[in-house]
Structures are given as structure tokens and as C-alpha cells.
Image (spheres, helix red, strand yellow):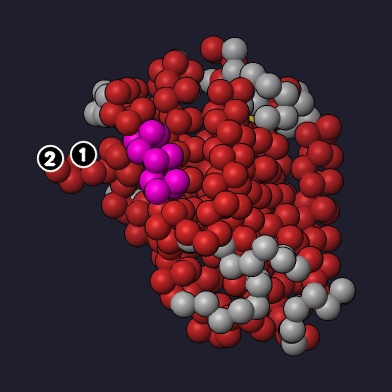
Amino acid sequence: MLLTKIRSYFRLGRIHSAVLTGLAPVCTAAAIGRSLSLHHYLELFLLGFLFHIYLFTLNEVRDIDIDKASESFTMKPLVNGSISLKNAKGIVFSSVALIFILTFVFFFEQALILIPISLVALAIGGGYDYLGKRFPHADYFIALMLLFVALYGGFSVSTDLSFFVYVIALLALVQMLINNIIAGLKDVDHDYVTGGLSTPMRMGVRAEGEHFLISTSFIAYIVLLKIVHISLTVLPFIARLMPFGSWQFYIVLVLIVIAVFFMIRVLTMKIFNREKIMRAIGFHEIFTFMVIPFLLLGYIGCEATLVLIFLPVIWLGVFLVIMYGRLMPAI
């Protein structure tokens, strides 16, 4: 019974995907190029984790009516009643309170700049949760929130951030933007029922029975964003913004090719299969993130780079098994 309850709360906060949000401020702090203690990175990871819990728990609260309209979401805690709406709102408020409290506890000297950054991130994230499926291109809200969460990490170390730090933060923004937009593909079969309009639906993507119809304009939009992401990825090498070896550049190119492969796989699907869409999106997100540890290698060393590469994969696998009994979310 207790394990079932824990699983429900994990599902509510989408804990399996929290690792990348948690690592966003960690990566920008590492990009400063200073020697930081392990507990500094752990504190940043915890703060990033709390931002994730706030964003996605509030999203579940706001989307409850839309989710109840789909038979695919009967396992969602707020839909099946395993967690009350009151408790979910309590988690949202607790996450916000902890973000402010821990900012003062962990980073008191930087609190004057970190508190405003937190307020902006929370406001933007809340805007996404309230307007995400009704406001055109609201995906930029969630992407901008992650940008500020990432900048939180940099400003926890210094108020004088290098261009490289901003590039890492922008990579987080564009990655979140792309993944959030294509994640909307998995919901096009039911969002229209309650009037929810995600970016894919606004751009003509439809699921008609088993047929999956992806518009040319949507494909062009995603390709353009991916070009921006790839440009930001190779910029640090071209501009020599950080120390690196040529082999790092080639590995990053391979990771880019793999990520593009999974994106193409999503965009060329002809049959609507929610699970296959989610799997391809997940692989795209993981391989896209993996380029960042290789950008940071010259600052953090091989051991920390390996941690950043494999932690998301291990975290995702462990929590998916705990939550759903398999390496694929059911909701």
C-alpha cells in the first residue's frame, strides 16, 4: 500500500524526467570553470529538482479536466483519485516555499540575485501550466523557465558569467523547447476533445483513427529549431570557448547524428502509436543532452563527465521500473 502511494506521487511529479531539470543548474555552474565542492552541485541539483516538481505537478493540476477526457490517462494519480487535488496543490506550494528557503540556506550571499531569478522562473513556468494548451506557442514559456533555472546555477557561483555559460543555458532552452513541442505529438489524439491546442495541433498535425498526419509546416519548424540547436552545440568548438580535444568534437557530431535520427523517426511516423512516439522522443532527449557533458569535459574532468552522461540514463531506467514496472512510462 505504501509503495503504491509512493508510486502515485512519483507519477504526479514525473520524477523519471526530473534528472535533466535538476542537472540544468549543475551544468551552468560547471561551465564557470571553477573548482566547486560536491555539495554545491548536489544543492543545485536539489533546487533544479524542486523547480521540476513545481512545474509538472502544477501542470497535472491544471490539465485534470483534459486528462479525464482520455481513456489513455486512467493511471494518472489525479484522474484515478489516488492523490487528491488538495494534496497536489500542497506539493506545488511546498516546492515553491522550499526553493526560497533553500536558496537562503545554501546560497545566502547570492540570494539577492537568485531570488529574482527564481521568481521569474516560477512565474514563467506557471504561465505555461495555465496557458500551455490555449496560448499559441506557449512552449517558449517552459523553455524560458528552464533557461532561468540553468542561469540559477551560474549565478550561484558568480555574477560575472562568461559567454560559454550563456551558451550552455541557451542549449538547455532550445532542447527543452524542441522536446516540449514534439512531446505534444503524443497527445494530439485527445487534446482537441476539451479544446486544448498544442503547437502541433495549431500547425495542422492530426490523428485520424490510426493515421498520423504531420504537416509540412510543423516539420519545417522543428527542422529550423534543430538547426539552431546544432549551431549552438558546435559554436563553443568553433569559437574556442572552452578547452577541448578534436576527439570531443567528433563524439559530439556522432551524438548529434543519433539525436537527429530519432527526431526524423518521430516526424516520419504514418501510424499514430503513442508509445512509439514517446520512446523516440525520449531517446532524442537523452542523446541531445549527452553533448553537454562533452562540452564541459575540459572543466570537470573525465569522471564527472561520465557521471553526467550516465546519471540521466540510470535515473530514467530506475524510476521508470519503480513507477511503471517497465522502461516506458504508461502516462
Up the image or down, 302 lies above or below 73; here it is: below
Quadrant containing the N terminus is: top left
- At 87% from the left and 74% from the top, the residue drawn is 238
Where residue 271 sits, quadrant-wise, is top right
**Magenta segment includes 53:** no
Residue that carries the numbered disc 1 in the rendered image: 5
Farthest left residue in view: 1
Query: Which image quarter is the C terminus in?
Result: top left
- Total numbered badges shown on the rendered structure: 2
Q: Position of residue 170 (x, y in %)?
A: 73, 55
Residue 140, horizontal then vertical, whole percent: 70, 37
Q: Is label 2 in a helix, a strand or a loop?
A: loop
Query: Mark number for residue 1?
Result: 2
At 29% from the left and 52% from the top, the residue drawn is 322
Indicate the amino acid at tag 1. Lys
The quarter of the picture where residue 7 lies is top left
Q: Which mark is residue 71?
A: none
Question: Residue sitting at 83 percent across and 53 percent down?
Answer: 227
Tell me the quarter of the picture where residue 179 sits. top right
Q: Position of residue 81 (x, y in %)?
A: 26, 23
User: What range is drawn magenta here?
Assistant: 91-101
Query: Dot 1, crowdedness within 10 Å: few (<14), some or many (≥20)?
Result: few
The majority secondary structure of the magenta stretch comes to helix
